Amino acid sequence: MVANLIDDDPEEAYAYSRIALRLASRVAAVREAAGFAAYATQRYTEALAEFRAARRMTGSVELWPVMADCERGLGRPERAMAMAGEPEVQKLDKAGQVEMRMVAAGARRDMGQIDAAIVTLQGPELASNSVQPWTARLRYAYADALLTAGREAEAREWFAKAIEADKDGLTDASDRLAQLDGVDFVDALDEDSEESGRTAPAAAEAEIVVTDDAETGVEAETEAEAEAEVEAEVETDVESQGDKD
């Protein structure tokens, strides 16, 4: 459920992760999932604690970059930079090393070292024409750093390269490039409404608001009932297991 919900409803994913933690806190996969749920909701202290617990259980270093990014989230970029220089980084696979480089560049930017951030992102992975799962994000980070440094022409070039690699729409590189080119997107429906000079009556607007609130209330009640049922089922299962033991 955490994996299914984390992109569209991170708060709900976090709620499920808390239930999982209560039932199976000694399972490494549960601690890792809880860490990502907390990370997605910007609960960086919790996320870091869960990632550390998962690492102790598995001995794996694959969570090292996201742990460093949690340090950034907690306002400690210096610690993130220190982690970028630890031996664990050398044990990461290529994707993990690229991720660590982006985190380190972000930490440099947090400390106001924009030129150092640009240099940190440079490397064979950035220059390669081969498209990997992380290529679009790396090119985007580089373009964004260049733009922050005032190197607009280069930033435009790298946003375009990010678009070429971003087949799944992981970044908003196309929007950023359009902004640099001075392109403004206009909602055609709003434009038609303005040209016709017609606006929705106030009473109709009020009616829509009331309807939306009512629907929201029903959905909230339904979700609350569903959560209550889940909690009740979990408690029953735990009690039953206790009786069997």
Image: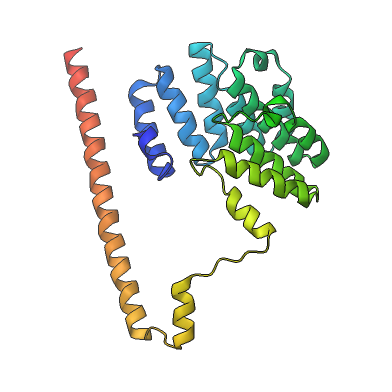
- Residue 165, located in which quarter of the rendered image? top right
Instruction: Identify the residue at horizontal 48%, vertical 83% (top origin).
Output: 194
Colour pattern of the rendering = rainbow
So how many labels did they put on this image?
0
Q: Is residue 21 visible?
A: yes
| Quarter of the figure with the C terminus | top left
Instruction: Identify the residue at horizontal 31%, vertical 73% (top origin).
Output: 210
* Identity of the residue furthest to the front in this view: 129
* Front position in the image: 107 or 117: 117
Left or right: 148 with respect to 235?
right
Q: Position of residue 58 (x, y in %)?
A: 49, 12
Q: Eyeballing the image, is 186 above or below 156?
A: below
Q: Is residue 74 visible?
A: no
Q: Position of residue 196 (x, y in %)?
A: 44, 87
Q: Eyeballing the image, is 235 above or below 55?
A: below
* Identity of the residue furthest to the bottom in this view: 197
Left or right: 10 with respect to 60?
left
Q: Position of residue 149 (x, y in %)?
A: 80, 47
Instruction: Identify the residue at horizontal 56%, vertical 66% (top origin).
Output: 185
Instruction: Identify the residue at horizontal 42%, vertical 87% (top origin).
Output: 198
Q: Position of residue 144 (x, y in %)?
A: 70, 45
Q: Eyeballing the image, is 177 above or below 170?
A: below
| Quarter of the figure with the N terminus | top left
* Front position in the image: 155 or 235: 155
